[in-house]
Amino acid sequence: MNSTITLEAPAKINIGLHVLSKRKDNYHNIETIFYPVKLSDKITVKISSHSGTGAIINFTTNGRLINNNDNLCVKAVSLFLQEFNIQESFKIYMRLCKKIPIGAGLGGGSSDAAAVLKILSGAFGLDENQKKKLDKVALKIGSDVPYFLLGNAAYASSRGEKLIPLPDFKIDNAILIVNPGIHVSTPLAYKMLGIKNEKPKTLNTIKVYSEKYIDKFTNDFEKVVFKKHPEIRIIKEEMKKFGAVYS
């Protein structure tokens, strides 16, 4: 085999985010609307046969070699080969051009991993039944990864992996993404939130984007993140001051 495939890996934003309860597996039940944006990474995967045994995985980000088995793209390759029992010897070289900020809540790492799964699925010629197993592989990588296999707008619940496509949910307004360079630890944010047991609020009833729903698109993390990083609240207020419909 000798195959080289390049894919865009788009970022996503959350239109509203409600944290409902903590689960027995220590994850949290949430509800949100995932929406793709044009900002994207680009990943190229080159696959070639070699005479040794097993897979040789090589991964670079913006020209920097990454030796980390916990990297989501590396994990995607390993889990893919394991799930589909691919035992032939291959060199798999991945080159990532990274544009989505790390730790910004835009799903960059998850999107990159999903793009790798799509590329491998095509390169190894998975049939339709096998492709149905990709969601299982994606979820082992991370809660957001199944969404990026789907793409387009979707209502997400449970850990974020239960998805209902929203084909009519389209935002015609320009979308401005501001990155103040602040990284908020997700586990810490959940800890500060202090979760109660709640039922889904209103996002599960929304099928299209409309300004009449703006007051429904609340983000539960704002109250704790704004307290710790008031500069983020100021950015939101400034955006509204200059005419943002939703921020």
Image (spheres, rainbow, N blue to C red):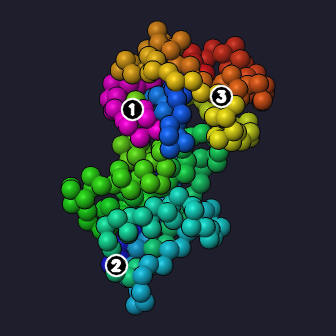
10 displayed left or right of 190 = left
Quadrant of the image occupied by residue 161? top left
| Disc number for residue 87 | 2
Q: Quadrant of the C terminus?
A: top right
Q: Which residues are magenta?
A: 156-174
Q: Position of residue 142 (x, y in %)?
A: 49, 50
Q: CA distance from mark 2 to mark 3?
A: 45 Å
Q: Are marks 3 and 1 in contact (CB under 8 Å)?
A: no
Q: Residue at x 21, y 60 (%)?
A: 127
Name which residue lies at 52% across and 24% down.
197
Judge from the rendering whether residue 188 lies leftward or rightward of residue 14; answer left or right. right
Q: Residue at x 33, y 24 (%)?
A: 168
Query: Could you say which disc has been placed on residue 193 in the image?
Result: 3
Amino acid type of the residue tagged 1 in the rendering: Ala
Question: What amino acid type is highlighted by mark number 2?
Answer: Gln
Q: Main secondary structure of the magenta part?
A: loop
- Please name the amino acid that badge 3 sits on: Leu
| Residue of label 1 | 154
